[in-house]
Amino acid sequence: MDQAFLDQLTQWRRQLHAQPELSEHEHATSRFVQEKLTELGIPFVAGVGGTGVVATLSRPGSNRTVGLRADMDALPIQELNTAAYASQTQGAMHACGHDGHTVALLGTAAMLAADEGWKGQVQFIFQPAEENGVGAKAMIQDGLFERFPMERVFSFHNWPGLEAGTIAVHDGPVMAAGGRWSVTLHGLAGHAAIPHQTRDPIVAAGHLIVALQTIVARNVDPVDAVVLSIGQISGGVVSNQIPESVTLLGTLRTYRPEVREAVIKRMESIIAGICEAYGMQADVEILSTGRPIINTPAEAALSVQAGQAIGAPVRRDVRPSTTGDDFSFLIKERPGAYVWIGNGPAGPEGELHNARYDFNDAILPVCVGWMSEVARRALADAA
């Protein structure tokens, strides 16, 4: 990649970074993508699954097809960086690097459009709403695979803490199945000075918090990775009242469906027991809509070969993460692989979803190079 092209991609990336949009609201981002595709002379279809865009490049001589995907949405986080291109949108920022992913896919489209040395068809999938987990499913429901044929599908995520430009390829699981859950305990409100006339949901919630932690520690086989975390607790409005209710919100991450089912069953049992013990009623919602990302062997091998072909360091020893990504729904429908490309040192405040995180523009050549090469190899592969 020459310096002028890298400078152009960097300018695009920083422009997107300054104008982040939340899941299902990526209207300006979608227009930006469409404008750049138009300038590149690449045909596209907009409005796929909401604000999604799919561009298509074809070369005669082969009926092979491949899909490349990037996510476009930002997070509801107030940015703390002070760069000139920092977010101009109150309460939103690209804290996960989707601005870099989007621009890398645009760069890949430009590279492949200028390259006459491949045959077949490439679908460039600009996906909305990854962060809230609905974008991939929305595009599939809108006929993604029927309208835009692809035999395989590939994607990447930048990865802080992995050496910049290093490509990590996993055999099997890459990310976990995610799922939000909520529990609202309903007791009996009353004066905090006469607690015996109330049924205190705060006390019940305290016992529930401790009891839920025993699931991973005592009900899950130690060889199975499970995360059961509570991220929000709310209840009460004044210091001298026992509130009527307390709500707990959390996340559940697993790799194996049978483990997920067992954990949910145990959660429901513990919640019922706490309600019985403390005189509570409970509203329970456990969303189990996530899927793990599990690379298919042939596509993982192609990903390694593509990384080696562009001269990038490739690692096979990086452990999977319990984070999630709805690329899992695309890879459910087609064989594929999802790799990590190192963003460089994370530092104390440079992790994903941190208010001081920033995508490393210096890795754009590896991102574009890997996607371009994996597409060429997928189209040429006889498998």
Image (spheres, rainbow, N blue to C red):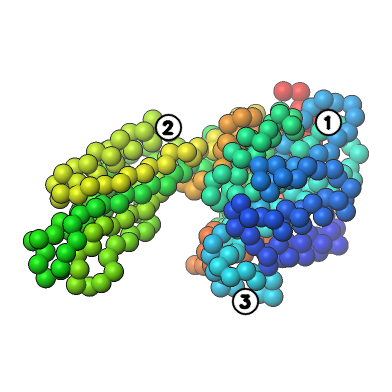
**Mark 3 = which residue?**
82
Residue in front for this viewpoint, 220 or 49: 49
Q: Which residue is mark 1?
A: 120
Which callout, 3 or 1, points at the residue further toward the start of the chain? 3
Mark 2 element type: helix
Tell me where residue 283 appears, x and y as whole percent. Answer: 30, 46
Evaluate if marks 2 and 3 touch, with contact meaning CB atoms under 8 Å apart: no
Q: Is residue 169 visible?
A: no
Q: Residue 364, image x and y in percent?
A: 73, 56
Residue type beneath disc 3: Thr
Horizontal arrangement in the rendering, residue 286 relative to residue 13 (left or right)? left
SS label for mark 3: loop
Q: Amino acid at mark 1?
A: Gly
* Mark with earlier residue (2, 3): 3
According to the picture, the residue beneath numbered tag 2 turns out to be: 257
The residue located at (51%, 43%) in the rendering is: 175
